[in-house]
Image (spheres, coloured by chain):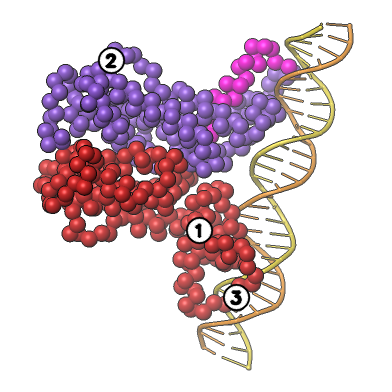
Chain colours: A purple, B red, C orange, D yellow
Amino acid sequence: MGDRDTFEATRKRGRPTAEERVERRSQILDAALPVFLERGFGQATVDELAAAARVSKRTIYSYFGDKAGVFTEMVRSLATTVSDRGPHEETLEALAARMVYRLDSAELIGLHRLVIAESTRFPELAVSLHDNGEVQHIARLAEHIRRERGAQAAERAPELFTLLVGESHRKRLLGLMPAVTREGAREQAAAALAILGLRGIAAAEPHDPASL
Amino acid sequence: MGDRDTFEATRKRGRPTAEERVERRSQILDAALPVFLERGFGQATVDELAAAARVSKRTIYSYFGDKAGVFTEMVRSLATTVSDRGPHEETLEALAARMVYRLDSAELIGLHRLVIAESTRFPELAVSLHDNGEVQHIARLAEHIRRERGAQAAERAPELFTLLVGESHRKRLLGLMPAVTREGAREQAAAALAILGLRGIAAAEPHDPASL
DNA sequence: ATATAATGACACCAACGCGTTTCATTATAT
DNA sequence: ATATAATGAAACGCGTTGGTGTCATTATAT
């Protein structure tokens, strides 16, 4: 990506082709993500956004109106991709591990951090992220638990989700831990399931009878 | 607090007395908190900090060097107060409820949000907050559990802490929930303890048997 | 072919905000 | 008493940045 600054030279001028036109919008949003992630909304300048997207500042304003427009559109489009779209046939444990891996990825942690930081200025983004993320995840967990363990056990889905993200999520939000590994996600998922007695298949025997 | 702007008029000039001198520092830090909380580090201006503290901008620079200095000193001094200093004789459930109440207070949520937002710019503040907060809280929980249930049960302290803060903490970080009530904190603590089978030992009569 | 829409490059502006300077003022040190 | 340190008030320098204007350039519409 160093070439961005080195031989910037002259990009193609003039009216873009129809193909270029449809690409431009997502091109800008894609390029905006890393900029906002490492600089934050306030510190990121529109010139940086333009340079990252290899587009003129003028074009950014023509597409999104202002800097806040780029930000909100970017977060909104990302929020819709947060929801988990995995195979329906996998086991609860596999689903949980995949969730942890995704939730603790550098990208989603950064997005979360960004939205938390700007939750006062852009409250609707916080709502959007929550509705598309946490709410969907818990629903999905509940559905899996119900299939494997019945409706009553499914009521524990919120607590399972809480244990899944756990402290590591908070630590990562604070920048105190690197992104999770696949192995780490599996271990974390297994531990959370074990605590709630949801590990293993079929038999509804809680491994800790005192918990109920 | 409205008088801040209304009859600003003229404050006392000249060299302060010794008593005023020692007050000045904490006066600035105290006044800086609400400003940073509702504006964020980037949007808060030094003039706002000065006005809130009823002190001249000059004095702020003389005490803290720059805006970042005010911010880091404020967070650091607050971080040391995060740790729970309650009575040692209370029950685990009472301790847990008090913890939830404090952790979900508007003030600590705001502080957390602030530190998360600036964790890239001020990584050491994140470390400080974590060490003084989460680490201390978990240790304190572990100590209580050990006294009431033994060393083995005490190993669950991290998971208990996770369940205690739970989803409400994340929601509040996103600005999606108002500050917790005392009653809400009690219920949340009771639910978390019940899940881990840590409820009801030292005369801890559940005031709501239906909660689990 | 001609008009027009959309872009890149670049200059430009106005606002803002950090940090400094100046000067009057008041307590402290000696 | 006199010098000095610390402050309030106010102005200001100066860099940064969001957003616009201008013009050349290129594709599209008709």
The residue singled out by tag 3 in the image is B12
> Disc 3 residue type?
Lys
Please tell me which of labels 3 and 1 falls first in the chain: 3
Q: Is residue B50 visible?
A: no
Q: CA–CA distance between discs 1 and 2?
A: 51 Å
Whole-percent x, y for residue A111 in the image: 46, 33
The residue singled out by tag 2 in the image is A90
Quarter where residue B175 is shown: top left
Q: Chain of mark 2?
A: A
Q: Residue at x 23, y 53 (%)?
A: B94
Q: Chain of mark 3?
A: B
Res A11 label: none
Q: Nearer the viewer, residue B162 or A168?
A: B162
Helix, strand or loop at mark 2: loop
Callout 1 and callout 2 share a chain: no
The residue singled out by tag 1 in the image is B32
Helix, strand or loop at mark 3: loop
Helix, strand or loop at mark 1: helix
Q: Residue at x 59, y 54 (%)?
A: B45
Q: CA–CA distance between discs 3 and 1?
A: 20 Å
The magenta stretch spans which residues? A15-38
Q: CA–CA distance between discs 2 and 3?
A: 72 Å
Q: Residue at x 32, y 46 (%)?
A: B184
Q: Name the image quarter holding the N terminus of chain B.
A: bottom right
Whole-percent x, y for residue A14 in the image: 74, 18
